[in-house]
Amino acid sequence: MISFDSSLNLIQKSVLKSLKSEFVDINESFGRILASDLYSKCDYPRENLSSMDGAVIFKSDLNLKEIEIIGEIKAGDSFTNDFNKGQAKLIFTGGIVPGKNKVIIPKEQFLISKNKLIIKDRKIQNFIRIKGSDFKKKELCLSKNTKMNCRTIALAAAMRINKIEVIKKPNVIVIMTGDELISSDKEKPLVISTNQIMIKKIVNDFGGSLKNIYIVKDKIEELEKLIKKLRDFDILITSGGISRGKYDLVKKVLCNLKMKILFDRVSIKPGKPTTFGKFSKNRYFLGLPGNPVSCFTSLVFFFSKFINCFYGSDYLKITKTKLILNNNLKTNKHLTTFLRIKKIKNKPNFFNVFSKQDSAQMKILSESNGILIRKPYEKNLIKGTECNVLLYENMFSNHI
């Protein structure tokens, strides 16, 4: 049996960064990883722009008593005619400043009388955004391996880029095993396949591309026939059938198909039977236990590790939160333990650990809002201890 940390390190060493890429529209690129550097196609701003509502005049006209107003410049006007000394134009924020040697007088610093501009305050700051002051044409603005978010997408749009090259998402195929999930006489199954709901959501949210979910019986022939047909996947995920029971057949089938098992028992609770392996041509296998809580925790920790290795970056960052324990915990045993917790409603900085931690209990999993990880043989924790916990709401930060 391998330790939790060693299992993650083994995935780190085994999973190679993907070299596959594709082009996508920037509006569809949220959460994607850049496969190449992005250089701007234009200066930004593209022209000298006013940063204030006011009037634009020649700098040399600042001492004139009055200046003739001959027009106005709005934001969005594509072309603005220049004007002569002794003249002015009203200008709005974002309007193009015509010609050279101009200054912007904010509207609070002048009066208008009979179409004449009368300056009240001649102390002038720089209210012109100079062409290319943010970035210039052909300037590197977004580097390879950047994770796209709403801010970087907006930047790419300002760079006049419509499509970007990103790393292809890993293709994921899921197989659910178990006679209890399938009814041969067209009646309802004995067990609802709840795991596939969690797997589908987490795989897609964590940056994978779920291609298909299959449900098969606990029969070697059926499972082997299905896996042999599978082609276009980067990782195959199974749920159930990886423990040591009579009908836990997944590992036997995969070994028959020449898959190399890297680990098949991890010293964690829940999730001990979790298995990870590698096919040829950089295709991988993650075997999840069938119990819902075990499936959930193993998928969260091991699939997220695979994703980070596949993209070659901390695509998913585990964010820990400090909260205060509200009950007492005994010394931990020899396994790394994932305990479901719940924040206390009226005490937002405190949390309780559920007394029941059965790996099949869906209701407690649903009611929980985080996990406390306890290391092997960790000493008892008393009420009032500050702990690092993983809250589902920000466990994996995919921030704006």
Image: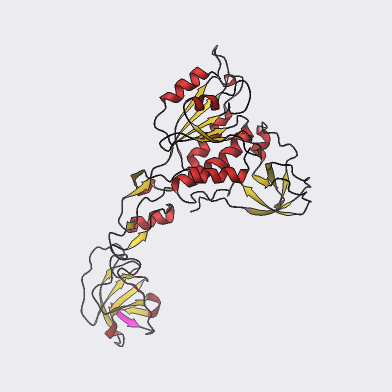
Q: Quadrant of the N terminus?
A: top right
Identify which residue is drawn at 60% across, 46% down: 5
Q: Position of residue 69 (x, y in %)?
A: 26, 76
Q: Position of residue 358 (x, y in %)?
A: 70, 34
Drawn side of residue 155 relative to residue 83, left or right = right
Q: Residue at x 69, y 45 (%)?
A: 342
Side (left or right) of 355 relative to 29: right
Closest to the observer, 23 or 84: 23
Question: Which quadrant of the figure has residue 210?
Answer: top left
Magenta stretch: includes residue 109: no
Residue 384's x, y, as percent? 77, 54
Q: Is residue 244 above or below residue 384?
A: above
* Chief secondary structure of the magenta portion: loop
State the residue in front, 66 or 254.
254
Q: Can you give x and y, in whole percent of width and height, for residue 257 in the image?
A: 47, 26
Whether residue 124 is in magenta: the answer is: yes
- Counting every numbered tag in the picture gives 0
Near-viewer residue (109 or 28): 28
Which residue sits at x=74%, y=42%?
A: 333
Residue 339 visible:
no
Q: Quadrant of residue 361?
A: top right
- 45 or 39, which lies in front? 39
Start-end of magenta stretch: 113-135
Q: Is residue 324 left or right of residue 204?
A: right
| Above or below: residue 313 compared with residue 275 | below
